[in-house]
């Protein structure tokens, strides 16, 4: 069974440009999460989808970030325009339920560098 | 505000040298405490979930315990393949995990 896949694995862009990150969850997983780790900091929650609906987007830093999950399958996270502080590793995770203790399956992340 | 503090930040062990990693937490309404392992260039990989004080879980050379204020990850007779970053995370009400910064473990032969 394929795991959570993320594209691209690395992205280097200039300040002011737009970048779109993609996440393909494990097939059949209705719950999809985005997390981010900025250098030297802990992994932080960004948002949570249940199917195509945003369940919780309290962790989104500002309106330059837009997440979508069309059809409840893959998800994209767009940053427009990118700023220097957006650099970090963006992780996607999925789970089959929201039962407490349900383990999350993480992708390998997208390393975003904004220059 | 919820807080998760892991110590030490880094730990170097000789193969076979047992030790413990600490995760101290402050959270309102803890619903679960999670341990994850992360290898370089990979995402976190689930290890354990603990729900209440006094609970213990084991997997191979790893044993996780939980009190009302902290959790320990005990590593017995570690091997070089146990080298990784170990992450602790708490789940307050809601669905967002709060992670600590992790402990980077290196086990040398």
Image: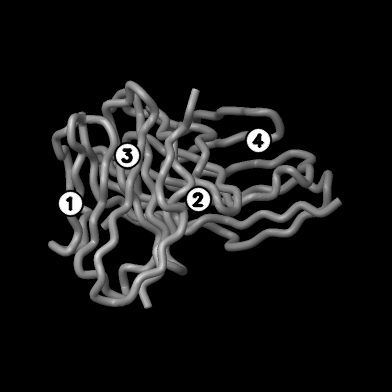
Of residues B64 and B46, the one drawn nearer to the viewer in this rendering: B46
Write down the chain letter for disc 2.
B
The first of marks 2 and 3 along the sequence is: 2
Q: Give the spatial CA distance, label 2 vs label 3.
A: 14 Å
Task: State which chain disc 3 sits on.
Answer: B
Q: Quadrant of the N terminus of chain B?
A: bottom left
In the figure, residue B2 lies in which quadrant? bottom left
Residue A109 image point, x, y percent? 44, 50
Q: Residues within 10 Å of mark 1 (few under 14, many from 20)?
A: few
* Residue behind mark 1: A58
Between residues A66 and B14, which one lies in front from this camera angle?
A66
The scheme the figure's colours follow is one colour
Dot 4 or dot 2: first in sequence order is 2
Left or right of residue A38, residue B10 in this image: right
Q: Nearer the viewer, residue B86 or A16?
A: A16
> Does mark 2 fall on the same chain as mark 4?
yes
Q: Identify the mark at residue B23; answer none if there is no mark.
A: 2
Asked whether the beta carbons under mark 4 and mark 3 sit within 8 Å of each other, the answer is no
Q: In this view, which residue lies farthest toward the right?
A: B109
**Residue beneath the point at 65% across and 41% down:** B74
């Amino acid at each position: 069974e394929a795991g959570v896949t993320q594209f691209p694995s690395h992205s280097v862009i200039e300040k002011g440009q737009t970048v779109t990150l993609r996440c393909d969850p494990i097939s059949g997983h209705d719950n999809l999460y985005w997390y981010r780790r900025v250098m030297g900091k802990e992994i932080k929650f960004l948002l949570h989808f249940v199917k195509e609906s945003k369940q919780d987007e309290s962790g989104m830093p500002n309106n330059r970030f837009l997440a979508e999950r069309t059809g409840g399958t893959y998800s994209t996270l767009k940053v427009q325009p990118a700023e220097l502080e957006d650099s970090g590793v963006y992780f996607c995770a999925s789970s089959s339920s929201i039962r407490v203790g349900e383990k999350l399956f993480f992708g390998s992340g997208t390393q975003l560098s904004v220059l | 505000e919820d807080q998760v503090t892991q110590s030490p930040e880094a730990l170097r062990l000789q193969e076979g040298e047992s030790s413990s990693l600490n995760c101290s937490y402050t959270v309102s309404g803890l619903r679960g405490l999670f341990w994850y392992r992360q290898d370089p260039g990979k995402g976190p990989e689930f290890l354990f979930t603990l729900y209440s004080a006094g609970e213990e879980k084991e997997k191979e050379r790893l044993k996780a315990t939980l009190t009302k204020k902290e959790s320990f990850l005990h590593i017995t007779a570690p091997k070089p393949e146990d080298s990784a970053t170990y992450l602790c995370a708490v789940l307050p009400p809601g669905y967002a995990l709060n992670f600590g910064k992790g402990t980077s473990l290196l086990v040398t032969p």
